[in-house]
Amino acid sequence: MNSENGAEFDAISVHNFTEKILEQVVHFHVMKFSGGFFLWVGSAPVLSNLAVSMSSKYDSMPLSTLVLGDPSNTAPNSLAQRLAKKTKKQVFVSYSIPVTDSNHSLLVENRIKKELELHPEHF
């Protein structure tokens, strides 16, 4: 815990990992903060979209919205929603990989879930 002007807050922690998935190198960047985390997934340094999702007392499925990017690309929203449901935290997701193959997206998500299991302290 740190404090500034009398307010207590947790420090931000950063965790990076990389995986070659179907011949494409995919980078993952996690920034954990108090109550949630930001996850960037991409193959090049681009922030093409941003979605946020969080639990709601009114619905079993977390609320989710796209903050930045093309609304026809549902990948960041869907991933943020599933991660918020799994972690019970507020989740920001930027998914900057062209969605050309649903199998590739599934493998990317499975890699994220594997990292969640191996290193839950980073999420």
Image (cartoon, rainbow, N blue to C red):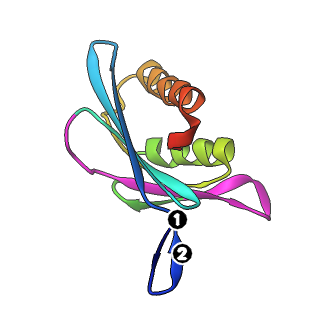
**Above or below — where is 49 with respect to 3?**
above
Residue 57 in the magenta stretch? The answer is yes
Q: Which image quadrant is residue 64 in?
A: bottom right
Query: Where in the figure is residue 13, as x and y percent of width and height?
Result: 42, 51
Q: Is residue 54 above or below residue 95?
A: below
Residue 35 horizontal side relative to residue 61, left or right = left
Q: Residue at x 51, y 63 (%)?
A: 10
In the displayed structure, 53 sits above or below 112; it is below
Q: Nearer the viewer, residue 12 or 92?
A: 12
Q: Where does the image place residue 4, in percent across and percent down from the top left?
A: 43, 80
Q: Residue furthest left?
A: 45
In the rendered image, which residue does mark 2 sit on?
8
Say few, some or many: other residues with alpha carbon within 10 Å of mark 2 (under 14 / 14 to 19 / 20 or more): few
Q: Secondary structure at mark 1?
A: loop
Q: Characterize the magenta stretch by its predominant secondary structure.
A: strand
- 13 vs 47, left or right, is right
Q: In the figure, is residue 62 to the left or right of 28? A: right
Residue under the point 59% across and 60% down? 35
Which residue was labeled with disc 1?
1
Query: Is the Cβ of the residue at disc 1 closer than 8 Å to that at disc 2?
Result: yes
- Highlighted magenta segment, given as a residue range: 44-64
Residue 120's spot in the image, x, y percent? 58, 37
Residue 117 lies left or right of residue 51; in this view the side is right
Q: Which residue is at a point 47% across and 76% down the rendered structure image?
A: 3
Q: Can residue 71 be seen here?
A: no
The residue depicted at 51 percent of the width and 70 percent of the height is 9
Q: Residue furthest top?
A: 23
Specify the amino acid type for callout 2: Glu
Q: Is residue 17 above or below residue 36?
A: above
Q: Amino acid at mark 1?
A: Met
